[in-house]
Amino acid sequence: MTITANGIEFETSIEGPEGAPVVTMSHSLCCDLTAWDELAEDLKKDHRVLRYSLRGHGKSAPVEGPYDFKMLADDVAAIQDAYGVTESHFVGLSIGGMIAQEFALRYPERTTSLVISSSLCALPDGAAALWPERIRLASEEGLEATVEPTMSRWFVEGPLDDRSELGKRVRKMIVDTSINGYVGCCHAIAGIDLRDRIPAIKKKTLVIVGREDMGTPLSSSELIHRQIEGSRLVVIDNAAHQLAIDKPEEFNQNVRAHLASV
């Protein structure tokens, strides 16, 4: 369903029983709301599951950037408003996990709990130079030029060899992302630094990461874990960045356990 929120059109989906606890999901760069298909299918039996595609991703409007996390968090609030959602768990992966942190800081009264997966609160050492180059490559050569480098960061070597349909699904999400959406989100990520702010987050938080994640390494999740008092850190072995797609059974089990504990 396409709705207008925060002045632009968003691709959205809401499933599950009326009156059930709401879970809002925010996906990674170069994905769309279908990246949550496995988790949504699991949770919609007993939760109200709200998904959306980030601005410039999927079928959401390819609005020109740059974007920032205030804007991206306000997008979520406006989408929730459109559906009458006043309080929700928030599950975010990669940039979605960064949005989750900003959202919890800006809208604590709307936030029931957080799952922050494969994410950052600040750029790792040496990462600042990567983002201008990624912006240049996409702008000059298109998202097709980013596919294989992205896949090598998102998945450990080998696991997709016998899952060709999954590989096609993920590659299609990458190339279907608009240049404006990609570049706008890259600018937001390049400027992230929430280290001094996230100790103010007091909601129950699960931090989950793949041990082989190169883009948002274990050390970055450990930093989030240290900064959010009382958070729980889970590390999934033989996994990289796209945990919800690559390791759905383990990922879903950990998310369910977290939701049940709140």
Image (tube, rainbow, N blue to C red):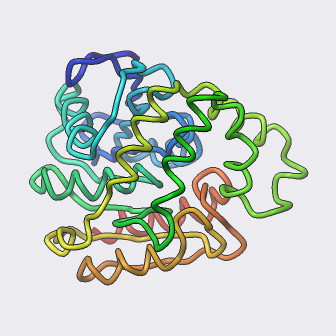
| Figure quadrant of the C terminus | bottom left
**Which of the 4 quarters of the picture holds residue 114?**
bottom left
Residue 48 position in % (x across, y down): 34, 40
Residue 15 position in % (x across, y down): 41, 32
Q: Viewed as shown, does residue 133 lie left or right of 199?
A: right
Give the number of marks. Answer: 0
Q: Is residue 18 above or below residue 240?
A: above
Residue closest to the far left: 109
**Which of the 4 quarters of the picture holds residue 241?**
bottom right
Residue nearer the viewer, 97 or 194: 194
Residue nearer the viewer, 62 or 221: 62
**Which of the 4 quarters of the picture holds residue 54?**
top left
Residue closest to the far right: 162
| Figure quadrant of the N terminus | top left
Residue 72 position in % (x across, y down): 28, 39
Residue at (63% x, 34% y) in the render: 174
Q: Viewed as shown, does residue 173 lie left or right of 41?
A: right
Residue at (31% x, 50% y) in the render: 99
Residue nearer the viewer, 247 or 215: 215
Q: Is residue 191 above or below residue 66?
A: below
Q: Viewed as shown, does residue 91 lie left or right of 30?
A: left
Residue at (22% x, 34% y) in the render: 80
Residue 49 position in % (x across, y down): 38, 40
Residue at (27% x, 79% y) in the render: 227
